[in-house]
Amino acid sequence: MKILIADDSRVMRQIVIRTLRQAGFDDHEIVEAEDGADALAKVGSEKPDLVLSDWNMPNMTGIECLQALRSSGSSVPFGFVTSEGSPEMREKAANAGALFLIAKPFNEDTFQEALSGVIA
Amino acid sequence: MTTIDTGERRRGAESRPVITELIDGATIESIAQDAWIALVGEEEVLVPLPGEPVTDPVSSWVDVVGPWTGSVVLTTGRRTAEELTRALLQEHSPEVLEDEDVADAFGEIANVVGGNVKAALPGSSGLSLPDVGEAPAPRNPDDVCRVDLLWRGETVSISVQGALPALPAH
């Protein structure tokens, strides 16, 4: 399975990769994107099976990326990993077609809970 | 020119809550502790005690814009910010840290703490991308909620501070 991780923070991308490994999802190919625009391009070029995206990013936010993907007909499974976990943000994410929203700070249990039905 | 004071401006300012009406130090401390455990390490404890004044300070912050507008500012010494960066990077920590690494890691901690402070505030607000450097000055001493903490014996302070009244335009 190929997982695209989009976050403008390189440190946070590494923490997400580490947490995926700790949660037992360690046998997957990882592709990184540094903002929403990069993620949008890489969904096209890399054909990931899942996108894990930050919300607040320069150039294109995560929600704009998701909306652009859905408008272009892409149904790639998409989840947020963001510091903004309010009910309002969760509703916005779900309405735009996100499968889940993992709020930062997270741990391997949070990842297992959100991803166990998504990652084979 | 004579200006008639209708009181509207004052009422506008008075209708905005100050941060101490919306969040307390214990909540900020709890948010920070959760962020530390998840990002810095499971054993990493923040002790709610003021430490030595920080020399060579560096701050990271995010701005919250909404019913309450201001910044969530973390301040510590540069060496402590570097130690935090190494803790976040773990095995990916380079021998020599670049300023960019410290800005990224310390900024991300502010982002996580700030995002959770924002979520604890009433109403709908926006959150900026993190910034790192010299902290924005508090604008109104009544609109500040500050906690002083110790991490590995070093001072880390978190100031949730209002951005109003705005600085005069130049």
Image (spheres, coloured by chain):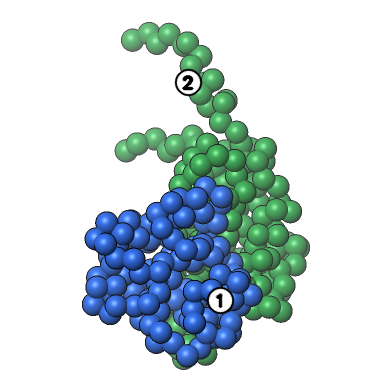
Labels 1 and 2 in the same subunit: no
Instruction: Check disc 1: other Cα within 10 Å, few if <14, some if 14-19, many if 20+.
Output: few
**C-alpha span from label 1 to label 2:** 54 Å
Given the image, what chain letter belongs to the residue carrying mark 2?
B
Judging depth in this view, the residue of B49 and B122 nearest the camera is B122
Q: Nearer the viewer, residue B28 or A55?
A: A55
Q: Residue at x 31, y 70 (%)?
A: A39
Left or right: A19 as drawn, with respect to B148: left
User: Disc number at residue A116?
Assistant: 1
Q: Which one of the lettered chains is coloured blue? A: A
On the image, numbered disc 2 is attached to which residue? B9
Q: Are marks 1 and 2 in contact (CB under 8 Å)?
A: no
Q: Secondary structure at mark 2?
A: helix
Q: Quadrant location of residue B151?
A: bottom right
Q: Residue at x 65, y 59 (%)?
A: B31
Across and down, in percent, residue A30 comes to 39, 83
Residue at the image point whose x is 52% and y is 81% from the top = A20
Q: Nearer the viewer, residue A94 or B47?
A: A94
In the rendered image of this protein, does residue A103 appear above or below residue B21? below
Amino acid, disc 2: Arg
Q: Colour of chain B?
A: green
**Viewer can see residue A87:** yes
Q: Is residue A107 found left or right of A43 in the rendered image?
A: right
The one nearer the camera, B106 or A7, is: A7
Near mark 2 (Cα within 10 A), the count class, few <14, some 14-19 or many ≥20, is few
